[in-house]
Image (tube, helix red, strand yellow):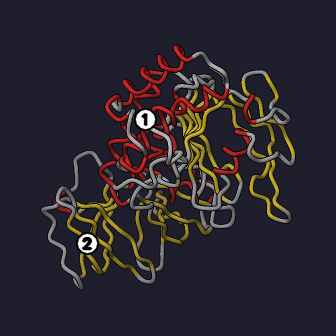
Amino acid sequence: MASVTYEHVTKRFGNVTALNDLTIEVADKEFLVLVGPSGCGKTTALRCLAGLEEVTEGRILIGDQVVNDVPPKDRDIAMVFQSYALYPHMTVYDNMAFGLKLRKVPKDEIRRRVQEAAEILGIEQLLDRKPRQLSGGQRQRVAVGRAIVRNPKVFLFDEPLSNLDAKLRVQTRTEISKLHKRLQTTFIYVTHDQVEAMTMADRIAVMNHGVLQQIDTPQNLYDAPANMFVAGFIGSPAMNFFRGTLKQADGHFYVVTETFQVQVPDERKSVYADHVGRPIVFGVRPEHIHHPDFAPPGIVPQPVEGTVEVTELMGNEIFVYMRTGDTQFVARVDPRADYRMGDKAQVVFDMSQMHLFDPDTEQAIR
């Protein structure tokens, strides 16, 4: 088992900087998820660790060893790819055993490791089949099994669930989480799906344009995003943003936009005092916007009126897409709420869950 450290790692492809001064410390046995939109640098970070890309600047350590110049085969890592990368002419057993055969592992040891991995993944009955005889989920298990038999210090996963259907993705991510707890090995997992990241990770590293935006536990990223990018990326549907000004009147602070005004809880005044009279971006998550008749107890409600544009009944809740002035926002409300397209309607914002951001730097105001 081993920790992983990125020390000021930069990777350039010609004039394009794919990673810019990336510094992350991954603890031994930690499950770290790298998340971000396509092109943010997360897969490049994984490939640099695997030795499939050379680092332009900085150092990568596995445990205490700098591995910049260590060949991929000697880094003691195992990687699970998005494409599965199974040999079509080999059986499942031979696919899982192939890497061990190359390392001249004794046959009895290979058989023991493959059988053990197959039992962990529930694919014992598939060992004699060829990949073409398997479903997508079964092929994914084989790809994971091929990594398990290596007993590596670090497991790397590059969007391993993206080729699976929605139901199978949920099932397989649960299996990978169980696998991590069982193997007690360092997992580094790349995805663009923030739901995967939130449900699986010990910590999440959010990236954009090759730059680490924030690294923290899933709950802390949700509760205290460092900037507007993280706030908008973590959570589904995304956080709503409204441009306005922070004003003071009658001893209270107010967020004032072109169409509405909401009072800031008094306990937040000391945090925001330096921004009174200045432009701000006000953020509130869809799940913190409620129908007035079905607002939960204990919130700090402030009413806002808008025009209903679209409603999406989800069964246990309704997504209500509304517009106020030039800004569209979405609310996740109680399924008993009666909102109809085209209606002028009122919602209440829970101001105890509000966020403010600096419009110039897009950093959270703390």
Task: Tell me the tag on residue 144.
Answer: none
| Residue 121, image x, y percentages | 38, 30
Query: Badge 2 is on which residue?
Result: 346
Front of the two marks 2 and 1: 1
Seen from this angle, which residue lies furthest front? 89
Residue 262 lies left or right of residue 171; in this view the side is: right
Instruction: Say which of 274 and 169 sits in front.
Output: 169
Q: Which quarter of the figure has residue 276? A: bottom right
The answer, for residue 114, to whether it is visible in the render is yes
Task: Look at label 2 and name its amino acid.
Answer: Gln
Instruction: Say which of 91 and 338 sits in front.
Output: 91
Badge 1 marks a residue whose secondary structure is helix
Specify which label sits upstream in the sequence, 2 or 1.
1
Q: In percent of the image, x 24 and y 73: which residue is there? A: 311
Q: In percent of the image, x 54 and y 58: which residue is there? A: 356
Q: CA distance from mark 2 to mark 1?
A: 43 Å
Q: Which quadrant: the N terminus?
A: top right
| Residue 312, image x, y percentages | 24, 70
Instruction: Say which of 83 and 351 sits in front.
Output: 83
Residue 51 lies left or right of residue 340; in this view the side is: right
The answer, for residue 270, to whether it is visible in the render is no
Task: Tell me the tag on residue 176.
Answer: 1
Q: Which quarter of the figure has residue 41? A: bottom right
